[in-house]
Amino acid sequence: MSISFGSALKVLNEIKATGVVQEYAIGGAMALVFWTEPIATYDLDVFVLFPPQEGPILSLAPLYEWARGRGYTLESEHIMIEGVPVQFLPSHNALSDEAIETARTMDYDGVAVRVVRPEYLAALYLEPSARTPKRRERVAALKEAGETDQALLKQILQRYNLEE
Amino acid sequence: MSPQPVSNHVRPTSELLDRLHAAKRTLHETHARLPLSAKVGMVLQLQRIVLPLLARQRPLRYWERPWEIEP
């Protein structure tokens, strides 16, 4: 084994540099690693904002074309990037737009990587479509995480009507 | 109301339970404070532990396999 997790993270910055995506931020369980205790997970969720496209319906074709050009295999909804199955999640609403835009740049073994802040991660888990017992546990862990700004979290939950 | 069943089991004191819970909290906090690469290493280890157990319960999905990478 010679590929490292950092290699996959570097590629995320490359995708942004090529302009295929306008902005990105790691979300989901791998984002938890940056803020609290790690949990088992099998893919890397990356929230993305795409540059303007023609037509009202978002197309992932440019992303898939880029992946093929780089020799990365596509497996249904995942792109295998440097040994890691990555799922690119187009921003689905104003909350996820804000989560991407306000992501914090973290350092992972010398690679700068954008990660959804814990307050937004918790809010995304509390969206009605995402609210499961497992995710509520994650929210509880995030609320206890030292890095979480409780006032900001409260404000986000109020603004998006996500209070528990 | 039916009477509580009588048990002869010896029970832990609340102090012992508190100590056990506190130790568990400390362990979680220690994990949370590990360097990032150590935490990614834990994710990789968890994948190797959890996936075989999951596979006993249901067919694994195509992305559910250990990442062949280093932290």
Image: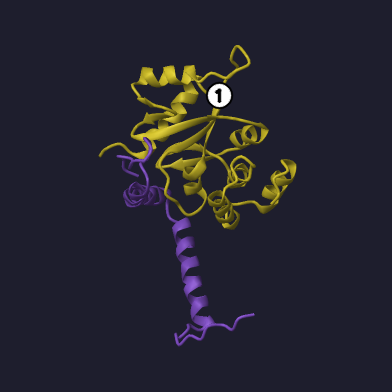
Query: Can you name the residue that lies furthest to the left here?
Result: A1
Above/below status of A102 relative to A68: below
Q: B2 or A117, which is in the foreground?
A: B2
Above/below status of A74 relative to B20: above
Task: Specify the amino acid type for callout 1.
Answer: Gln
Label 1 residue SS: loop
Is A149 left or right of B33, judged from the image as shown?
Answer: right
Percent across and percent down for residue A79 are: 40, 28
Percent across and percent down for residue B46 are: 36, 51
Q: Residue at x 30, y 39 (%)?
A: B68
Query: Can you name the residue that lies furthest to the front here?
Result: B2
- The N terminus of chain A lies in quadrant: top left
Q: Residue at x 44, y 29 (%)?
A: A77
Q: Colour of chain B?
A: purple
Q: Is residue B33 visible?
A: no
Residue to which mark 1 is pinned: A22
Percent across and percent down for residue A132 are: 57, 48
